[in-house]
Image (spheres, rainbow, N blue to C red):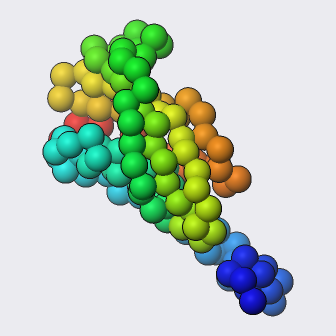
């Protein structure tokens, strides 16, 4: 039986457990701003784990810099990243476009678009300015 079918059968047998697992998977991951300053990959992994805790990072690219809407957030610098990843439960490939912004030593992000069936965690701490 494929993994998706097994998950569906388990969810039908115990809906409370399935709801609890979904809530845990949709909770934002922890953010380590100091570690994210190491490299573009570290930054992208930190952003991905905050928005999709169970996702598996594959690669990242800088799409453009600066982001034309950075002034709306009061940012001094910005870039748009494309983060490619695998779904933690489905292993299907997905990607998200995220604006990452800096003001002094603080950072924040904003999801521009993504193609996942499960929405990103909107209560990710990177939705507000985070300092090391």
Residue drawn at the location 18% of the way across and 29% of the way down: 105
Q: Is residue 81 left or right of residue 42?
A: right
Estimate the x, y position of residue 54 in percent, counting from the top left.
Answer: 49, 65
Estimate the x, y position of residue 79 in percent, counting from the top left.
Answer: 36, 24
Q: Quadrant of residue 33?
A: top left
Residue drawn at the location 57% of the way across and 62% of the way down: 87
Estimate the x, y position of residue 81 in percent, counting from the top left.
Answer: 42, 33
Residue drawn at the location 58% of the way across and 56% of the way down: 93
Q: Residue furthest right?
A: 12
Image quadrant for the C terminus? Answer: top left
**In the foreground, 87 or 32:** 87
Estimate the x, y position of residue 9 in percent, counting from the top left.
Answer: 80, 86
**In the foreground, 18 or 85:** 85
Q: Is residue 125 above or below residue 88?
A: above
Q: Is residue 117 above or below residue 65?
A: below
- Decide if residue 34 is in sight here: yes
Q: Is residue 58 left or right of residue 131?
A: right
Residue drawn at the location 65% of the way across and 50% of the way down: 116
Q: Is residue 105 above or below residue 34?
A: above
Picture mark count:
0
- Decide if residue 14 is in sight here: no
Q: Is residue 63 above or below residue 19?
A: above
Q: Is residue 74 left or right of residue 103?
A: right
**In the foreground, 84 or 109:** 84
Q: Quadrant of residue 15?
A: bottom right
Q: Quadrant of residue 2?
A: bottom right
Image quadrant for the N terminus? Answer: bottom right
């Amino acid at each position: 039986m494929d993994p998706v079918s097994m998950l569906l059968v388990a969810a039908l047998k115990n809906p409370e457990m399935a709801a609890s697992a979904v809530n845990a998977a949709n909770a934002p991951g922890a953010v380590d701003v100091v570690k994210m300053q190491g490299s573009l990959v570290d930054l992208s992994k930190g952003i991905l784990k905050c928005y999709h805790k169970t996702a598996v990072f594959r690669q990242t690219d800088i799409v453009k810099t600066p982001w034309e809407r950075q002034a709306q957030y009061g940012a001094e610098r910005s870039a748009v990243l494309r983060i490619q990843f695998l779904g933690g439960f489905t292993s299907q490939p997905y990607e998200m476009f995220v604006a990452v912004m800096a003001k002094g030593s603080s950072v924040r992000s904003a999801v521009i678009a993504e193609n996942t069936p499960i929405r990103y965690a909107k209560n990710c701490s990177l939705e507000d300015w985070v300092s090391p």
